[in-house]
Image (tube, rainbow, N blue to C red):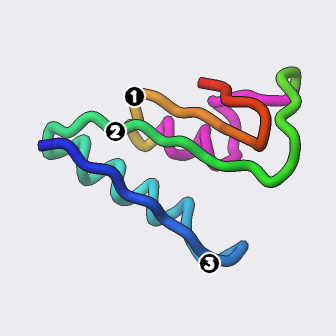
């Protein structure tokens, strides 16, 4: 089964935590999870670290096979 899920909410509302929990649950049931974060600011290639404490790193550690970030002009996987 394939699907796409979008999560939207205000800053500090728990979006990343929800993504962590969903990723853990889905991967435990055998699903492959990819995570793409939209950034409202420009992406600085030198500052992206998908293993850090930011959203992408947290969801990666929760089990996402692919993580990425996108802004108005750039997509980084």
Tag 2–tag 3 contact (CB < 8 Å):
no
Check disc 1 and report its element: helix, strand or loop. Answer: loop
**Residue 12 falls in image quadrant:** bottom right
Q: Earlier in the sequence, mark 1 or mark 2?
A: 2
User: Is 52 included in the stretch rendered in magenta?
Assistant: yes
For disc 2, the neighbor class at 10 Å (few under 14, some 14 to 19, many from 20) is many
Check disc 3 and report its element: helix, strand or loop. Answer: loop
Residue annotated with mark 3:
13
Tag 3–tag 1 contact (CB < 8 Å):
no
**What is the x, y in percent for residue 55?**
63, 49
> Is 35 situated left or right of 32 in this image?
right
Foreground residue among 19 and 1:
1
Could you tell me how far apart the alpha carbons at marks 2 and 3 are, in whole angstroms? 22 Å
**What is the x, y in percent for residue 31?**
20, 39
Residue annotated with mark 1:
65
Q: Earlier in the sequence, mark 2 or mark 3?
A: 3
Magenta segment boundaries in residue numbering: 47-61
Check disc 2 and report its element: helix, strand or loop. Answer: loop
> Is 71 situated left or right of 57 in this image?
right
Of the 4 image quadrants, the one containing the N terminus is top left
Residue annotated with mark 2:
33
């Amino acid at each position: 089964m394939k699907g796409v899920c979008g999560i939207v909410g205000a800053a500090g509302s728990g979006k990343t935590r929800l993504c962590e929990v969903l990723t853990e649950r889905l991967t435990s049931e055998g699903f492959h999870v990819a995570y793409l974060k939209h950034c409202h600011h420009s992406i600085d290639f030198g500052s992206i670290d998908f293993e850090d404490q930011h959203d992408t790193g947290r969801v990666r550690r929760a089990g996402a096979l692919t993580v990425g970030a996108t802004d108005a002009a750039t997509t980084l996987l």
